[in-house]
Amino acid sequence: MSIEFNDDRILVSAAEMAAIETRLFDAGFPVAALMEKVAGRIAQWLHQWLQQTDKSLPNRPQIGVLVGPGHNGGDALVVARELWLQGYPICLYRPLDKAKSLTQAHLNYAQSLGIPILDSYEDLKPCDLILDGLFGFGQTRPLEGDLAQLITWLNQQPQPCISIDIPSGLHTDTGEVLGVALRAEITLCLGLWKRGLLCDRALEYVGQVQRIDFDIPQADIEAVLGSSPAWQRITSDWAKQALPLPRAQATHKYQQGHLLLIAGSSQYAGAAILAALGARASGVGMMTLAVPESLKPLLNAQLPEALVLGCRETSQGAIAALPPDLDFNRYDAIALGPGLSQETPSLLQQSLQQSAPLILDADGLNLLAAASDWQQGQPERGFWRNQPLILTPHPGEFRRLFPNLSQPFPPDAAQQAASQSGAIIVLKGARVAIATPEGQVQINPHSTPALARGGSGDVLTGLIGGLIATGARQESPLPSLVAAAVWWHAQGAQMAQKQRSSLGVDAWTLAQTLPYVLGPDGDT
């Protein structure tokens, strides 16, 4: 996957961030100078936020600052000093007496300025705002005893909390709660995005996340992560560039891809319709739908532009077999699974043997998981495949496909699954992770709980299939197209939510909203 270097896209582990900072210090950048720079930018951001935000806070709110023993505490002390000098009422609370030498020096200076230090965390009650500077990136030990009691108490208070870098009590790499964690309204991530901030389990703790850039030289980032970092977050600008836009003025439908969608059964006709609507929104030049014969009139009515193939069906209303004269070579991509049922494993075997990229979802994944040796590549079983395979499981389907992977962090699990299977993995969740066999991982930070509705995944399958079919004609990188589809899908849900609330975004509405996400020039 070709990814242009962009530090707003990079995701780092605690070890990687520490290695990058060590390079800065080894090159002669003083730790104290970096602390002043970072904390100065935090203080500037906070001042602007307090002046502009429409919140029930006074013009000069009283800010309680939690000071930890490490450099995160030092950052907090410098922020406290700067805001104090700007006239903000500040008070400090230190749950631990120990401190690193630089942090202690800033504490001494804060005391010399007359900034009060509280004796008890209960004295924070009069504060209008809490700034969390207890623990920064790299925390791995569970918070226990008095610290756990402090965090629990803070989570019960009405004041908003803003955390420096990462809420205290969260694991930097996985977002795991280390015993107890502070629930922040805003997290100010320093330098580069930390992986744990994009983990599903961290979402109820991190609140709104803002990155505070402090100008890390590209050379130092590349020295640790390489010129194309493996872990990245999807940004809107990047996703729009990955889409097959703009189209050539002299193009025609046969140059914009042809998708074969194999879907539907008498029980799940809607899944086929929703997947087809997702494909329609992608702008794919041609779409062929293979559905049970009894569904053909319904699909023709809903999607008059599609070519609908009625297939012989089983007594239960599922596809029994594809038409014998079906020419797979006509198609630039194949999507199989939505509403299909698991009655006919031969559909999967037949599709896996084709040369076009194959997207599997829903019953396509269930059929694949039922073949316990599918990853071993046994040609006689029909599960051997050299062409691109894209799997789009939710967590339950993922566990059935990869029962031996116990990695608790979903993006890590997706990365391992992609490496193990040779497939591109789209692991669904509140933050979708896309992993490639080469070890690259992209996480979509743009999402909404409005997508927690039946049929949303069917729309995504069609959207991915349509984009891949279109992109195949332009030789676009498949992983980029998949990631762009995930982004587009989430943007559609967010747009619909603004009109209907998170409770009103059904899958049909989502599919109808997708075409409006991109403006006439590809702008959102």
Image (tube, grey):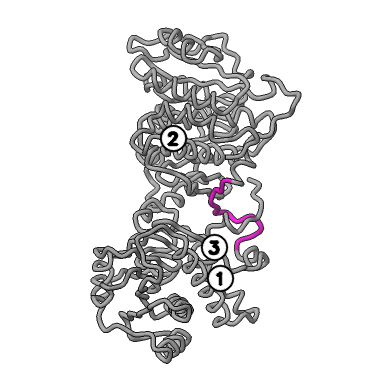
| Residue on which disc 2 sits | 496
| Residue on which disc 3 sits | 192
**What type is the residue that disc 3 sits on?**
Leu
Residue sitting farthest toward the right:
250
**What type is the residue that disc 1 sits on?**
Ala
Residue 246 showing in the rendered view: yes
For image coordinates 40% across by 40% down, the residue present is 398
Mark closer to the chain start, 1 or 2: 1
Marker count (numbered): 3
**What type is the residue that disc 2 sits on?**
Ala
* Mark 3 or 2, closer to the camera: 2
User: Label 2's element?
Assistant: helix
User: Label 1's element?
Assistant: helix
For image coordinates 48% across by 32% down, the residue present is 460
| Crowding at mark 1 (Cα within 10 Å: few <14, some 14-19, many 20+) | some
On the image, the x and y values in percent for residue 119 come to: 26, 84
Mark closer to the chain start, 1 or 3: 1
Q: What's the magenta region? A: 225-236
| Residue on which disc 1 sits | 19
Q: Which label was assigned to residue 296?
A: none
* Mark 1 or 3, closer to the camera: 3
Residue 384 showing in the rendered view: no
